[in-house]
Image (spheres, rainbow, N blue to C red):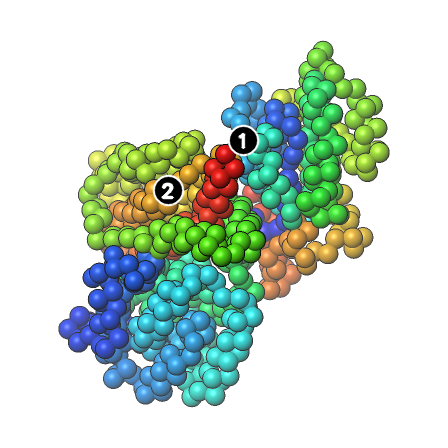
Amino acid sequence: MAYAYLFKYIIIGDTGVGKSCLLLQFTDKRFQPVHDLTIGVEFGARMITIDGKQIKLQIWDTAGQESFRSITRSYYRGAAGALLVYDITRRDTFNHLTTWLEDARQHSNSNMVIMLIGNKSDLESRREVKKEEGEAFAREHGLIFMETSAKTASNVEEAFINTAKEIYEKIQEGVFDINNEANGIKIGPQHPTTSSILTSGQGGQQAGGGCC
Amino acid sequence: MSDSEASHTAADGSPEALPETHDASPAESDSSSPTTPDNSTDVAPTRKARRRPEAKPEAEETPKAEEQPAKTSSETTVSQGSWGYWGSWGKSILSTASATVATVGQGLTQVIEKAETSLGIPSPTELSAQVEEEQQQQDSSPVHDGGSETDKAAADGPSAVGSAMGMLSSLTSVVQSTGKTVITGGLDALEFIGKKTMDVIAEGDPGFKKTKGLMIRNATLSQVLREAKEREELQTAETESSDSEKKVVAHYGMLFDEFQGLSHLEALEILSRESESKVKSVLTTLSGDELVQLRGELDHIKDSFSLVEFDDEEVDEKKDEDGSEFERELMEAMEGLSVSATADKLTKACKSTCSQITDMNKPQKEEEEEEEEEDGKKSLSVEEVHAAAIRSLAELTARSIELFHKLAEMILFSNGSAEPSVLSQLTVVLCKEISLLSKKFTSCLTSAGSNEKRDVLNPLITGVFLEASNSASYIQDAFQLLMPILEISHIQRRSESSEQ
């Protein structure tokens, strides 16, 4: 429960690309083929471990509908990481990436780590966007890239965790000022007690985190 | 020290017998005519005023028996600005419970005035300046020595109070966040709990020590709640390692976060802040008659936000056993507001709470699967009932705040016209439900703990009532956050219609 860091993420991208399904797969390890349209923003949270440290991901899953854009933009600020999602079976969702990226860069801090995600990789037969195209776009704009399937859970865990690793590295390099909460990073509650108590306390929590 | 005082205060009995004091009477007239337009107080002062005479007499009474310095302290404190006054609350409480009660009673007048003039939260600098002032004052005061002693005693306090500590520290957090919150929260609880509250606070709350730091740093409700949650996490980590027997400790703040209450609150705050600055910038572009007219319209919206009337005396413990009446009232209040999915979550949470309570009330008839015979009649321990109560309150509050957040999004999204009166009715329904459930839970606690000692049971009951009143305060604060959203939505609809 206690964490070393808390990272705020946003998930953005066109409507119907599977943003909420990715989140549900990551937090609850399940897939829901029919998902209600997201209104504004919904939330999810999960604890992960990087470099032996407990990190809490606080994920803001935004509505993809164009009409919600002016509201969801308000939520970009203060995110440390963004998952920019498109649907490999719908070329238009890939074509809109530039707009999403501009929007994200404009309304968030410049150090935000962006992971480009081509979702629905299980639907190979209906693929409209080649993996190489995604890779090229990511390279061109300095993003990390992965293809995922919220349905089969392929790469879902990796997408969230690799983003966190990148953020963590940036913290180690001193790129992120962790004392500025506008960067979407918070240091966990500090234990004023001795380190022995701290270690034993965390041991218990790790066991607890594993089961949920 | 705190122990003996606590029992002394508790034993002191009948506060009602004492005469009302001068500053109680104007407040009384306030509450008796809450609809007077000039008297546009918000819900908090109205309720506050009603409670005041309850807390007051105790204050009058105890100083006689206590040492004089305590009284002096509370008087000097009152002479400070109202916000600075809250800063010293922690210390006064730790000095003597009675002095604190006196302070609460007298300070209210100022808080009410403050709340009338602004619902906003004071700037951190303003707070810190006053805290410093306070501190100097306190340092030079003779009470200070006694205070720190009690402080120490409180720190090593009895572990029986442990489970109540989480919520008490969130109470102290709220104390720093808004005076209004304190008013709506603290005194409501006082009505139920009376003297016990202060005893428990004096005995067991280490949160006060962090009071000053919090005051300086915090400006928003979500931050305050987040910090409260983090302290609870720390406490949990510590108790986990230090003594394993204490398993059933319910931490309101952590649970509230688990139900995503913090996130929804944070998002709602973002929308509220942005709307507020948009309204301001629109106002700066206008002048003359246009400005006057718009200001008038906005004031009309503001007024609706300050006329919420919540009277929990109407709440009847017996009614609404399965939560269906709440559902009906909620649906009624929500008519025309298109966020049914979120409302469903709330009614589900409420219904499951109601069935939980029903199960608790018939323990003898059915054997609970997981319960062994050894406990005799009781199927749930008082700690378990308490934990269930805190969990339910945290969930319902989180869902209520989620509902307000979704409402805010829908209002901005559809640019629909939501009547402030509908929203305030919704707030009343939610707060009533919280109050009703807390009463049901405490009667469960009372019957489950019929064999327990008072000093085990009372802090738990106090805990439920305090968290319930905190919950109501959070809901009312979230309601207030909707105001700028309605304002900007009004402005947008207005400009649309003038374009046509």
* Image depth: mark 2 or mark 1 in front: 2
Q: Secondary structure at mark 2?
A: loop
Instruction: Between residue B304 and residue B308, name the one nearer to us.
Output: B304
Q: Residue furthest front?
A: B289
Residue A10: give x, y in percent of width and height: 64, 39
| Count of number-bearing discs | 2
Q: Label 2 marks which chain's residue?
A: B
Instruction: Between residue B70 and residue A118, name the one nearer to us.
Output: A118
Q: Quadrant of the N terminus of chain B?
A: bottom left
Instruction: Between residue B357 and residue B418, name the one nearer to us.
Output: B418
The answer to the question of whether label 2 and label 1 lie on touching residues, with beta carbons closer than 8 A, is no
Left or right, A162 with reference to B19: right
Left or right, B398 with reference to A61: left
Residue B100, image quadrant: bottom left
Residue B385: give x, y in percent of width and height: 33, 47
Q: Secondary structure at mark 1?
A: loop
Residue drawn at (29%, 63%), measured in percent from left and top? B39
Query: At label 2, which amino acid type do we have?
Result: Glu
Residue drawn at (74%, 25%), measured in percent from left and top? A95
Query: At label 1, which amino acid type do we have?
Result: Thr
Q: Is residue B446 visible?
A: no
Residue B169: give x, y in percent of width and height: 45, 62
Q: Label 1 marks which chain's residue?
A: A
Residue B257: give x, y in percent of width and height: 50, 47
Q: Which residue is mark 1?
A: A38
Left or right, B55 with reference to A70: left
Relative height, residue A30 to residue B294 (above, below): above
Q: Is residue B422 visible?
A: yes
Q: What is the distance, in whole Å, between disc 2 and disc 1 at their CAs?
A: 24 Å
Residue drawn at (68%, 15%), measured in percent from left and top? A123
